[in-house]
């Protein structure tokens, strides 16, 4: 593990056993995060973004079976593989909420309606920081002030239904940051908010990131949010990362057809009224019984017949820090990968006719032997 990295995800798979078969929701994801940086994980709904992030904390449903490695630089345990820990054990619980925290998609669902906001924020404080009720309350209220919640003394004792959507999102951020984590996972934290409140929340997260010096893994499908928040971007499709680069590079020079489609679907300031936004046809397929082919094949407008439908491209580096998984790319690394795969497919195609011819000859010989009266039949 690189000393600069706080997290390294290596060949992560998440399989879900269902009555209909095996659902391969996450298929070999690789990425790393440095201290203090923001990585955006982008893609449509159903691409496996949330399952990937929940696998880091070990909070996926018990039907989900993760494999691979998730290496984390923990203060108490050193460099540890999170997947090797007992997901209900003391070690992972010492990391979960304290060193790695998460902001969930829907704050109204994330909070229990049965307990006050202060009680729920205070739970993490008493578990990881201090057992003293008075001191833990002071810490919780201080964090509530930092995230911009006014009249904290009153708000501390109120229930979730007494908060507005934006204020509830602030409370959820406070609950995630109360233990000063090294890493924050934000799973579409602004989805349910209007544009004005969304901008306030994003600005708040950037300020708190500087104050706490924490890394942020930001999950979203909104490329406008990515441009504002992220240092690097990983584009995910059908359980795999198909392109990754610095945020500025992704916007200036997108290479994968899926990335170009996502950027083309965003309205740009100064565009003409009659100009239509780009639309990617179709939907993300179900990740079950997938063929050996590019996952984006059915929706791609630059697919190569006989190649993209017979093999799946791997991530290759086309420039420092810029990786892409596509056969139809002009860069040297992509061309080399395409040439290797085409040669392999040609070799398989060449061996198949020989095998078929041998099998046919064998069947014809057996037929001749079985004809009555034939000398080779062996019967008088």
Image (spheres, rainbow, N blue to C red):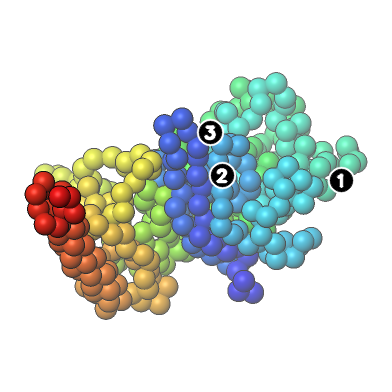
Q: How far apart are labels 2 and 1 at the CA level?
A: 34 Å
Residue 264 image offset from top left, x and y in percent = 24, 52
Q: Quadrant of the N terminus?
A: bottom right
Identify the residue under disc 2.
Answer: 65
Confirm or deny contact between disc 2 and disc 1 (CB under 8 A): no
Mark 1 — residue?
A: 130
Residue 62 visible in the current orientation:
yes
Secondary element at image label 3:
loop
Give the SS element for disc 1.
loop
Q: Position of residue 95 (x, y in %)?
A: 72, 52
In this rendering, the label closer to the viewer, 3 or 2: 2
Instruction: State which tag comes first along the sequence, 3 or 1.
Output: 3
- Image mark for residue 106: 3
Looking at the rendered structure, the secondary structure element under dot 2 is strand
* Residue 173 seen in render: no
Give residue 229's position: percent from left, percent from top.
47, 56
Task: Name which of mark 3 and mark 2 comes first in the sequence.
Answer: 2
In the depicted structure, whether residue 251 falls above or below residue 337: above
Q: Residues within 10 Å of mark 3 (few under 14, many from 20)?
A: some
User: Residue at coordinates 77% horizontally, 51% vertically from top-left?
Assistant: 91
Seen at 46% across and 30% down, the residue is 19
Closer to the camera, 321 or 18? 18
- Per the model, the C-alpha gap separating discs 3 and 2 is 25 Å
Image position, residue 133 (x, y; %): 88, 37
Relative to 111, residue 214 above or below: below
Q: Residue at x 44, y 45 (%)?
A: 24
In this rendering, would 29 be left or right of 310? right
Callout 1: few (<14), some (14-19), or many (20+) C-alpha neighbours within 10 Å? some
């Amino acid at each position: 593990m690189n000393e600069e990295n706080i997290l390294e995800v290596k060949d992560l798979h998440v399989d879900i056993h269902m009555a209909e078969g095996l659902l391969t929701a996450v298929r070999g994801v690789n990425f790393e995060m440095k201290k203090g940086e923001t990585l955006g994980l982008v893609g449509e709904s159903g691409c496996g973004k949330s399952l990937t992030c929940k696998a880091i904390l070990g909070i996926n449903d018990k039907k989900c079976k993760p494999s691979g490695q998730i290496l984390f630089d923990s203060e108490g345990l050193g460099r540890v593989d999170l997947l090797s820990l007992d997901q209900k054990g003391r070690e992972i619980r010492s990391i979960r909420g304290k060193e790695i925290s998460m902001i969930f998609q829907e704050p109204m669902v994330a909070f229990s309606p049965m307990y006050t906001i202060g009680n729920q924020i205070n739970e993490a404080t008493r578990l990881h920081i201090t057992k003293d009720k008075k001191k833990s309350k002071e810490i919780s209220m201080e964090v509530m002030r930092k995230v911009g919640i006014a009249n904290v003394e009153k708000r501390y004792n109120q229930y979730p239904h007494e908060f507005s959507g934006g204020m509830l999102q602030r409370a959820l951020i406070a609950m995630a940051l109360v233990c000063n984590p090294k890493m924050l996972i934000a799973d579409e934290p602004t989805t349910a908010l209007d544009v004005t409140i969304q901008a306030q929340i994003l600005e708040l997260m950037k300020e708190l990131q500087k104050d706490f010096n924490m890394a942020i893994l930001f999950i979203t499908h909104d490329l406008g949010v990515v441009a504002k928040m992220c240092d690097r971007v990983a584009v995910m499709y059908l359980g795999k990362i198909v392109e990754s680069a610095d945020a500025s590079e992704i916007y200036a020079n997108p290479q994968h057809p899926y990335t170009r489609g996502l950027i083309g679907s965003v309205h740009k300031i100064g565009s003409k009224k009659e100009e239509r936004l780009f639309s990617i046809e179709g939907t993300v397929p179900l990740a079950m019984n997938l063929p050996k082919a590019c996952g984006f094949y059915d929706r791609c407008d630059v697919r190569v017949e006989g190649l993209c439908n017979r093999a799946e491209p791997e991530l290759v580096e086309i420039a420092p820090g810029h990786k892409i998984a596509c056969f139809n790319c002009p860069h040297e690394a992509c061309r080399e990968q395409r040439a290797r795969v085409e040669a392999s497919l040609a070799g398989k195609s060449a061996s198949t006719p020989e095998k078929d011819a041998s099998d046919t000859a064998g069947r014809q010989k057996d037929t001749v032997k079985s004809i009555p009266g034939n000398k080779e039949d062996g019967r008088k």
